[in-house]
């Protein structure tokens, strides 16, 4: 189980680094950069929460049933593709498209499943889990895309 948690946390940290790259890329637009930094912070929080699930699962506990390894391999490949695209330099619209691809992937669902499976064992972590924003992350992305990208598009 702990190996599964480590893999998921690593994917969450990678998404955080991707969003930090976007914050750096758009630093000339302070509100946009702040948005990407906030998203990066949330991804790092997701990684911390997943790793903190070790307080609930013994090190020897088997992983949850399911095709986890294949799912995580697919998520890793997807993230690698998005990271390569972002490294080439992207427009703001492309950055949002990359982020939407990641947020629409199964990563949030996998992280949410780990949190749900951990249940009440999260004793002191309850407030952090509530603030993690897994359920609203995709919606937040879509709202920001509309806010920040609509100004770039010519009005008909």
Image (tube, grey):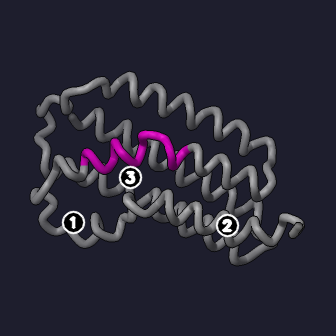
Dividing the picture into quadrants, the one containing residue 71 is: top left
Marks 1 and 3, how far apart at CA? 13 Å
Residue 42 spot, x, y in % from top left? 46, 63
- Crowding at dot 2, Cα within 10 Å, few <14 / some 14-19 / many 20+, comes out as few
Inter-mark Cα distance, 3 to 2: 27 Å
Distance (Cα) linking label 1 and label 2 = 33 Å
Membership of 110 in magenta stretch = yes
Q: Quadrant of the C terminus?
A: bottom right
The disc label shown at residue 125, or none: 1
From this viewpoint, which residue is outermost toward the bottom? 31
* Of residues 15 and 103, the one drawn nearer to the viewer in this rendering: 103
Name the residue located 41 percent from the left edge and 30 percent from the top edge.
72
Which quadrant is the N terminus positioned in? Answer: top left
Magenta-colored span: 102-114
Label 1, residues with CA under 10 Å away: few <14, some 14-19, many ≥20: some
Which residue occupies 25% across, 26% down?
66
Residue carrying label 2: 146
Q: Secondary structure at mark 2?
A: helix
Side of 34 where 77 appears, left or right: left
Q: Nearer the viewer, residue 104 or 69?
A: 104
Which tag, 3 or 2, sits closer to the chain's start? 3
Q: Residue at x 50, y 45 (%)?
A: 104
**Based on the displayed image, in which of its 4 quarters is residue 87 positioned?**
top right
- Residue 144: image quadrant is bottom right
User: Main structural element of the magenta stretch: helix, strand or loop?
Assistant: helix
Image coordinates for residue 126, horizontal then vertical, percent: 20, 68
Taking the magenta stretch, the answer to whether it contains residue 14 is no
């Amino acid at each position: 189980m702990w190996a599964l948690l480590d893999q998921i946390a690593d994917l969450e940290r990678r998404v955080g680094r991707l969003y930090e790259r976007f914050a750096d890329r758009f630093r000339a637009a302070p509100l946009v950069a702040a948005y990407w930094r906030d998203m990066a912070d949330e991804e790092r929080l997701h990684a911390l929460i997943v790793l903190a699930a070790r307080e609930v699962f013994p090190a020897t506990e088997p992983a949850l049933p399911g095709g986890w390894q294949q799912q995580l391999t697919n998520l890793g490949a997807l993230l690698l593709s998005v990271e390569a695209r972002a490294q080439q330099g992207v427009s703001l619209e492309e950055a949002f498209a990359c982020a939407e691809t990641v947020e629409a992937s199964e990563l949030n669902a996998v992280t949410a499943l780990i949190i749900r499976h951990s249940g009440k064992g999260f004793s002191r972590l309850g407030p952090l889990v509530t603030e993690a924003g897994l359920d609203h992350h995709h919606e937040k992305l879509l709202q920001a895309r509309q806010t920040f990208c609509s100004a770039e598009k010519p009005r008909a």
